[in-house]
């Protein structure tokens, strides 16, 4: 049984899954795509969809021998600096084209797949897809149009903002943020996501196959990811929300995910985000939920 961990040993979650798979008896290796094409080699035959990966330690992994890949982190490719920018761009495109072709190999079970990651990279599309399932989401605007943003803020008592793609924490919109010159300067750089603030309790649901594990996250912070002392309390979801978790994972092509919810004082569950490569070690240790066990089962079945 051959299983790759997409990422490297410096990531605690990648190392944890690597160790758990090794203890189970699988043959495991890290696949760090940032080492391609300088230190690893890829080959692919379009006629047969067969090919191979040669890792930096010279291990050769035939695609048809790989049972599954645990997608922890994707680093793209790293091209050496070239004197001619056009040639460097061509090299980058060529390397990514081969890599993307391998990432679509249908004989391999991807946990999760390239297609699933596109929903995460395109979060406005993810929200729209989930809303079409009948799941409630916050009123949301994604824009770099100052007039539209000001109208949206005026329509709601409290509004938060965050990057469209991610990479920074959530903040409340303040009058200072809406200062005309400051707003125009920020929006000329990039659009942002604006949402009505939903009061209530933070919940996180891990979905692995047909299993759903949920905990309440008790923290006074607007963005609980900043609170290292946040308390995790295991809870049971209503059956309707349990089924929504499974439906969300299916719609977003996710073999496993962490779904963030806000539970309002009125008892409504509001979807915030589904992460295709969530951190889980702290959650597992605090709740006792068998996240690792179910992940391994997904990768070996």
Image: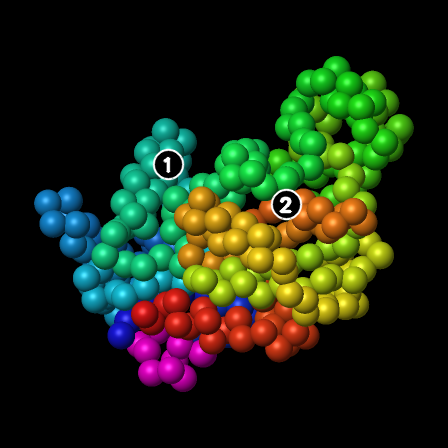
Name the residue located 36 percent from the left edge and 39 percent from the top edge. Answer: 92
In terms of image quadrants, where is residue 84? top left
Residue with the most extreme left position: 47
On screen, 63 above or below 155? below
Q: Does residue 122 appear in this view? A: no
**Is residue 20 magenta-colored?**
yes
Which quadrant is home to the C terminus? bottom left
**Is residue 83 magenta-colored?**
no
Which quadrant is home to the N terminus? bottom left
Quick one: 134 or 78, which is closer to the camera?
A: 134
User: Few, some or many C-alpha atoms within 10 Å of disc 1 (few <14, some 14-19, many ≥20)?
Assistant: some
Residue with the most extreme right position: 175
Residue with the most extreme top position: 147
Name the residue located 74 percent from the left edge and 44 percent from the top edge. Answer: 170
The reply, left or right, for residue 124 in relation to residue 209 is right
- Residue 41, x across and y down, in percent: 26, 56
Residue under circle 1?
88
What segment carries the magenta color? 19-30
Q: Which element carries disc 1, helix, strand or loop?
A: helix
On screen, 16 above or below 176? below
Quick one: 241 or 285, which is closer to the camera?
A: 241
Residue under circle 2?
271
- Residue 235, x across and y down, in percent: 68, 66
What is the distance, in whole Å, between disc 2 and disc 1 at their CAs? 42 Å
User: Few, some or many C-alpha atoms within 10 Å of disc 2 (few <14, some 14-19, many ≥20)?
Assistant: many
Q: Does residue 231 appear in this view? A: yes
């Amino acid at each position: 049984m051959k299983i790759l961990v997409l990422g490297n040993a410096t990531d605690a979650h990648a190392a944890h899954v690597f160790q758990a798979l090794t203890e189970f008896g699988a043959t495991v290796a890290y696949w760090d795509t940032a080492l391609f094409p300088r230190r690893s080699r890829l080959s692919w035959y379009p006629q047969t969809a067969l090919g191979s990966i040669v890792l930096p330690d010279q291990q050769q992994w035939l695609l048809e021998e790989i049972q599954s890949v645990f997608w922890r982190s994707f680093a793209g490719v790293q091209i050496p600096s070239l004197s001619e920018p056009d040639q460097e761009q061509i090299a980058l495109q060529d390397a990514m084209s081969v890599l993307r072709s391998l990432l679509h190999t249908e004989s391999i079970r991807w946990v999760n797949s390239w297609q699933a990651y596109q929903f995460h990279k395109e979060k406005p599309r993810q929200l729209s897809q989930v809303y079409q399932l009948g799941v409630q989401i916050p009123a949301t605007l994604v824009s770099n149009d100052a007039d539209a943003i000001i109208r949206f803020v005026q329509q709601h008592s409290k509004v938060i903002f965050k990057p469209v793609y991610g990479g920074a924490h959530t903040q409340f919109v303040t009058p200072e943020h809406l200062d005309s010159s400051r707003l125009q300067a920020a929006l000329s750089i990039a659009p942002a996501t604006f949402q009505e603030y939903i009061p209530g309790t933070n919940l996180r649901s891990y979905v692995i196959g047909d299993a759903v594990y949920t905990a309440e996250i008790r923290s006074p912070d607007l963005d609980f990811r900043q609170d290292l002392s946040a308390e995790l309390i295991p809870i049971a979801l209503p059956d309707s929300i349990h089924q929504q978790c499974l439906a969300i994972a299916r719609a977003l092509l996710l073999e496993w995910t962490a779904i963030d919810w806000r539970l309002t004082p009125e008892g409504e569950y509001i979807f915030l985000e589904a992460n295709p490569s969530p951190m889980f070690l702290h959650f597992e240790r605090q709740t006792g939920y068998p996240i690792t066990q179910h992940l391994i089962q997904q990768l070996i079945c």
